[in-house]
Structure formats: structure tokens, C-alpha cells
Image (cartoon, rainbow, N blue to C red):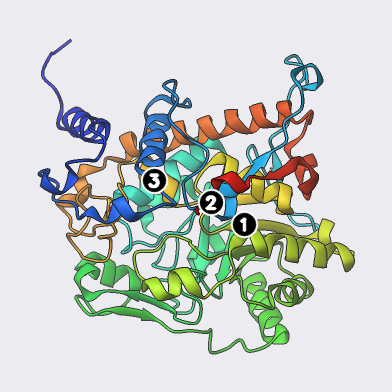
Amino acid sequence: MSKKKTAEQKIIEKHTEALHRGFQDWPTLEFGLPPTMFEDKRWTPELILSTWIQAQTGNIPDNGLEYRIGDSGGGFDVLDFNFLPEEQWTPKNVKIDTSLVLNKRNDGLAIITIPVPFYGAAMSFGSISLNTMLSKAMAAYMMGTFSNTGEGGYPDELIPYKDHVITQVATGLFGVKEETIQRARIVDLKYAQAAKPGLGGHLLGDKVTLAVAEMRESVPWISALSPFPFHSVYSVEDHKKHIDWIKQINPRALVSTKVSTTIDIDMVASGSYDAGTHVLNIDGGYGGTGAAPDIAKKNIAMPTELAIPRVHKHLVQEETRNNILLIASGGIRTAYDGLKAIALGADGWIIGTAELVAIGCTRCANCERGRGCPFGITTTDPELSQLITPEWGSQQILNLYKSHENQIIDACRKLGLTKVTDLRGRTDLLKYCPERKHK
Ligand code: SF4
């Protein structure tokens, strides 16, 4: 075998090396990253590194690095599980079921089952590169779960993986066509994103290349703005009309509805159930985005961990909880965050930023600019985006998925469960850890 290293191997080595240096000298590295990552208590350098290690190996780190929580002093970081004494664990010879059924309405539409209780986040062509999109879609295909096109259109390159790609219809209707809706097994109506509720989307002109503009049917190098809200939807009845419109175009598709965690999120959930949605995605504060001001990201939406039990309890009271799938997103970084979301009342979760960390994101917060991403992840520059190849990227993400799957099995075993679905709403299995709060 040739000893000559491929460009890809060199990038991986350089990145791993830099990560292992402990981030102390990042600003002086050739990547030129700003030091913003030092201030990120949610995604600590240790958590970034342990996520990267999982993406490289498919396993949790074996050197004691923290892979479950960050250091925010709140939210998921101050919750933990009350694991049982070892003699009460589910025996090793008992198989743990980690699968999730996505259609609970019993309405004659397809019963889609995914092998793990999570799927990939919506990230649009334009906000990320085509190769990053392909990496996500190929990983979802290999895992048997889903990825999501986001709101920037459906590139043809994703068609081979279409059975595992959700297509999104958002307020800008960028790239939305009848054929893309007909292609999908799940159509996602995005009403809001909790990182920027009430603000819509803003893809800076720098990233609207010829290819991105063509896909979005917009003007190159001019910012692509998605309005807020859908100007055709101001009530539950309008929402129902929207769902009926999707069903008219694709009667086989399941419908997912993405909403942000506003104060009346429980009422929104009821209305969305009545309108006919199959999957309700509640997107809580701290979700990742490269296009929202800090004031919006951190201060408007309700944190995910508060919104989940509110919605869960409300739907239980209304006796509709078992007919709708509740998927949590927004700030879910690890398998443990996801499992805590289920214990609080969700059915499953969406993995977003962690997928990008798996392919080299260091959380430098430079995603908005066209050539801003030093690792070619969120860039739309044709040259820079070649730093990620779909083959390498999908394997990294798949490894992370596999590591998360193993952690789900391990945690269920330690809680004496045989099915991850039995964890739903089991707040009694959680404990509060005040010692992790900041003084
Ligand atoms: S995707 Fe790229 S630009 Fe954005 S935070 Fe990660 S490394 Fe930085």
C-alpha cells in the first residue's frame, strides 16, 4: 500500500492534532479561528473533542473525557439519571429495543419505523455545503433514519437517498416544488425556529452563490430572506389547510410540523394535533444556527427541557399523547441530552450541531460568511467545500450515530428497561445535580 497520505488523511490528522493540543493555541493556528469557543459553556472544548473521537471511532472516549454533558450550569447539564444498582440492570442477553414508530395516528398511512429515536436536523443548501448535505443524507440512509433538506431546496444529488430524506417547506418556499414534495416520505412544515422565533431566516448574500440562487430560484449574491410567519397561516384552521395542501400533492406523506417553544407551546401542540400533523417537532432555545443574533438565540424561546414536559403533560390530559409523535430539538448535543428529553416526555430527538462537530466543526461561530467556515462545512464556496467528501463525512456522522445508539442501549440497561419507548415521561428516573450549577 502506498505510504503517501491523501489530502483527506492530512486534513483529518491536522484536525485531530489541533483538537488534542487542547485548544490553548487556536487563535494562532493556521485555521485562524476566533477564540469565541472558549466562552461556550454548553459546547465545552472537552465535549467537542469527545464528540469528534466518537465520530472517528464509533465509541465513547476511553480516556475519561466527558462525552455526556457540557458546563453550562443549567438545563440538561444539571440533570442526570438515577441508574439502578448493577444487580437490577437488564441482563446482557435481553435485547434492548431502540426503535421508534413515526406514525401514531392509525390513519392508514405508512408506519415508518426508524432504528434509533433520533434523526438528523434540517440544514439548508446554502447554510451548509452540498457535500455536508450529502454526508448527512448518506449517514441517515446507512443508519436507516432520516435527514432533512432544510428550506433551501432539494438538490438532485440527494435523490438516491430520498427514502431517508425529509423535505422541508418553510416560509420562504425556496426551491419548493410539487416533485420534491411528492418525492418525500415525510414533509416538514417549518413555522418557526427557536434560535430565532419571530425572525424568519436570513442567508447572507455572501453565501448565495450561483448554485444556491438557482436552487432557491432567487438572485445570486443577494441575501435570501425567509419571512415570518407563513403569511397564509394565522390560525389552527389555516394550519389544517396547509396540511391538506401537502396531502393533496402527496397523499402518502407523513406531515411533520416544526414550531418554536413559545409560552403557549402546549396550545400550539393541541392545535397541530387537531390539524392532522403526525410529528410535532418542538424546537427549543439554544438550537444551532449560523444566522441569528445572540439576543434571539439565548433569550426568546423557552428552553427545550422546560417545554417538553409542558407539552407532554398537556397532550396526556387531552388524551391525544399516544396519537402524535413529539420530537425535541434545540440544544440536544449528546445521546444523554436526548435520553433526558425522552425521560421528560418526548418520543425522540433531532441531532443537529453534533453532526457538524462530527465532521470537524469547532464551534467558532463563523458560519454566516461565504468562505467563513475553515473546514468547508457551512461554506458555499465551491473550492472550500471540497474539504469534506461525502464518503468521509457520512462515515464520521454514522460513527457518531452508532456511538449514540450504544449509549442508548447502555443507559436503558442500567435503568432496567428493555425498550427506549418505556423511558418516555419517566421523570422519576432523573435526578437534579445542584453541584453542577455555577456559583
Ligand atoms: S460550521 Fe464551520 S464556521 Fe460554523 S462554527 Fe463550525 S467550524 Fe465554525
Which-is-in-front pick, marks 3 and 2? 3
Q: Residue furthest top?
A: 1
Q: Amino acid at mark 3?
A: Thr
Q: Does the rendering let one see residue 106?
A: no
Please tell me which residue is depicted at 40% across the width and 24% down the height of the picture: 57
Cα–Cα span, label 2 and label 1: 8 Å
Determine which of the numbered discs, if any, sits on residue 328 in the image. Answer: 1
The part of the image, by quadrant, that contains residue 220 is bottom left
Q: Residue drawn at (19%, 50%), measured in percent from left and top?
A: 374
Residue at disc 1, secondary structure? strand
347 shown above or below 296 = above
Residue found at x 79% / y 28% = 416
For this view, does 438 lie left or right of residue 213?
right
Q: Nearer the viewer, mark 2 or mark 1?
A: 2
Answer yes or no: do the residues labelled 2 and 1 have beta carbons within 8 Å? yes
Q: Are marks 1 and 3 in contact (CB under 8 Å)?
A: no
From mark 1 to mark 3, how far is it between C-alphas? 22 Å
Residue of label 2: 332
The answer to which of marks 3 and 2 sits earlier in the sequence is 3
Q: Does residue 435 sit above or below 202 in this rendering?
A: above
Instruction: Please name which of the two marks, 1 or 3, marks the residue nearer to the observer.
Output: 3
Q: Which residue is mark 3?
A: 44
Q: CA distance from mark 3 to mark 2?
A: 14 Å
Q: Is mark 3 within 8 Å of ligand 1?
A: no
Judge by depth and name the residue closer to the eye, 163 or 60.
60
